[in-house]
Amino acid sequence: MEELKKERKISVDNEGLGCCLMIGLVVGALLLGNAIRASRADDRVVSVKGLCEREVKADKVICPFAYKEGGDNLQQLYRTIEEKNGVIIEFLKDAGISEEEITIAAPKVVDTRTEWSGSQNRYAYIVTSVVTVCTDKVDEIIALQSRQGELLQRGIATAASWEYQTVYSFTKLNDIKPSMIETATKNARETAEKFAADSNSKLGKIKRATQGQFSITDRDSNTPYMKNVRVVTSVDYYLKD
């Protein structure tokens, strides 16, 4: 009798243990299913890019006025250079450029007899002088460049070259950065919303966003004082049903 009771008790305990295991398996399966569905939902992502471009005018310019003078008497050459530099400075000041914005570089002298040996040279010395303007008066410099014929009439032949080029720059990027990023992000969202609508989905939250680098380039080769500012943002959005 005692043995029969023990067998019944063991049977009941086993049945209870089996029920617990069954319940545990069911709950585990439900949790696993939910995890898989959540994982699949996280995998549904659309990656888009948003572009913003803006045309701006340069607000700073570095403009060199370079010319060459040749001769056989070095002292006389230096006096001529000083006189012509004075003419250029007067020309600049008359256009509204202040003295603080003007820099005169040390003359560069080439002794043609030693540095250009073997060639027929008209002068023993060639001296290059550069008067440079660094200013925010961009419009004044643009106007001056079209008036360099006035210097030519006074015996000063200034000419642009790869070594002495006018450089226009835009220094107020921080002032327009926030609005440009906002526009680029808005454009990216519009693209993502269109993709979601086409795929019968809804746009979710942002998974990841990356702000691209800003670039500033000349609009074209004829108007280097006009700049094109560009930024591209990359955004990943979740998609949901």
Image (cartoon, rainbow, N blue to C red):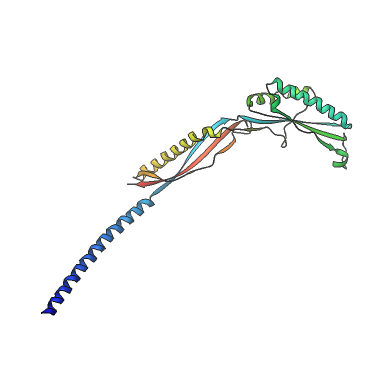
Q: Nearer the viewer, residue 14 or 55?
A: 14
Identity of the residue furthest to the left in this view: 1
Figure quadrant of residue 222: top right
Above-or-below relation of 30 to 169:
below
Q: How many marks?
A: 0
Figure quadrant of residue 17: bottom left
* Residue 231 rendering spot, x and y as whole percentages: 52, 39
Which quarter shows the N terminus? bottom left
Q: In the rendered view, does 169 fall on the left or right side of 80?
A: left
- Residue at the image position 65 percent from the left and 30 percent from the top: 61
* Residue 147 rendering spot, x and y as whole percentages: 71, 23
Q: Nearer the viewer, residue 23 or 61?
A: 23
Figure quadrant of residue 192: top left
Identity of the residue furthest to the top in this view: 94
Q: Nearer the viewer, residue 144 or 97?
A: 97
- Residue at the image position 71 percent from the left and 23 percent from the top: 92
* Residue 196 rendering spot, x and y as whole percentages: 37, 44
* Residue 189 rendering spot, x and y as whole percentages: 42, 40
- Residue at the image position 36 percent from the left and 54 percent from the top: 39
Identity of the residue furthest to the front in this view: 2
- Residue at the image position 56 percent from the left and 30 percent from the top: 56
